[in-house]
């Protein structure tokens, strides 16, 4: 239930005491009746936007299978998010709430390293977990998120071109299920 500042003041006056109310902005999920079935135009990825051609802000693909977002950046060789990525991830949180996404898979990918031994999947999984931790710290229930590391196994770009190969290191978001009502014990098991 949403209560306006005016309603709170009126209630205080009716009960015979003054009420001082501080206004704050709260990012909360809209009630289920207000949640949207189809993405609004401003939340839908523009034609031509893809994993290779990243959008300027988080958006939902036309087929509603993915959230595309600007690159999520980490400190070199670490799983610590750079603050520059916070607005991008807050956009993902907003889309999850606005469209009632009940299960989102966070995928970590790494660039291929020609001159060194492969890192394996562990570092990419730690990065996906770092994103999951950020999303949960901003109000998304952990049961609605799955983190998975794919290592160097799924490159999008030519691994022989150094600049393009760098872009293979990325975080991707795959929508697995819509609807909180659809999210029962199975969602809790995905944490």
Image (spheres, rainbow, N blue to C red):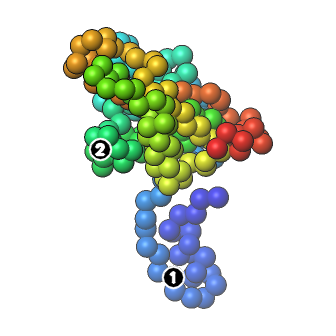
Q: Is residue 2 above or below residue 74?
A: below
Residue bearing the label numbered 2: 75
Q: Left of 26 or right of it: where is 52?
A: left
SS state under label 2: loop
> Where is the C terminus found, in terms of image quarters?
top right
User: In which quarter of the view is residue 124 placed?
Assistant: top left
Residue at image coords 46%, 29%: 120
Residue 99 is labelled as none
Report the Cα–Cα distance between label 1 and label 2.
Answer: 47 Å
SS state under label 1: loop
Residue at image coords 46%, 49%: 134
Residue bearing the label numbered 1: 19
| Mark 1: few/some/many CA within 10 Å (<14, 14-19, 20+) | few
Q: Is residue 30 above or below residue 170?
A: below
Residue at image coords 30%, 19%: 114
> Where is the N terminus found, in terms of image quarters?
bottom right
User: In which quarter of the view is residue 172 placed?
Assistant: top left
Q: Are marks 1 and 2 in contact (CB under 8 Å)?
A: no
Q: Is residue 130 above or below residue 179?
A: below
Where does residue 123 sit, x and y in percent of width and height? 44, 37
Q: Left of 59 or right of it: where is 148?
A: right
Q: Is residue 157 visible?
A: yes
Where does residue 24 sit, x and y in percent of width and height? 43, 65
Where does residue 37 sit, x and y in percent of width and height? 61, 28
Judge by depth and name the residue closer to the eye, 71 or 169: 169
Residue at image coords 50%, 43%: 129
Which is more N-terminal, label 2 or label 1? 1
Which tag is nearer the camera, tag 1 or tag 2? 2
């Amino acid at each position: 239930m949403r209560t306006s500042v005016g309603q709170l003041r009126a209630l205080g006056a009716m009960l015979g005491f003054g009420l001082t109310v501080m206004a704050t902005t709260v990012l909360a999920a809209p009630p289920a009746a207000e949640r949207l079935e189809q993405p609004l135009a401003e939340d839908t990825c523009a034609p031509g936007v893809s994993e290779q051609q990243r959008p300027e802000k988080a958006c939902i693909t036309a087929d509603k299978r993915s959230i595309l977002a600007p690159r999520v950046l980490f400190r070199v060789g670490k799983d610590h998010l750079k603050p520059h990525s916070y607005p991008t991830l807050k956009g993902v949180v907003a889309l999850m709430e606005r469209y009632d996404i009940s299960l989102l898979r966070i995928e970590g990918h790494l660039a291929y390293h020609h001159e060194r031994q492969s890192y394996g999947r562990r570092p990419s999984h730690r990065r996906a977990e770092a994103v999951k931790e950020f999303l949960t710290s901003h109000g998304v229930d952990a049961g609605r998120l799955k983190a998975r590391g794919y290592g160097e196994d799924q490159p999008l770009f030519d691994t022989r071109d150094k600049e393009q190969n760098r872009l293979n290191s990325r975080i991707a978001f795959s929508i697995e299920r819509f609807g909180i009502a659809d999210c029962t014990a199975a969602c809790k098991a995905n944490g």
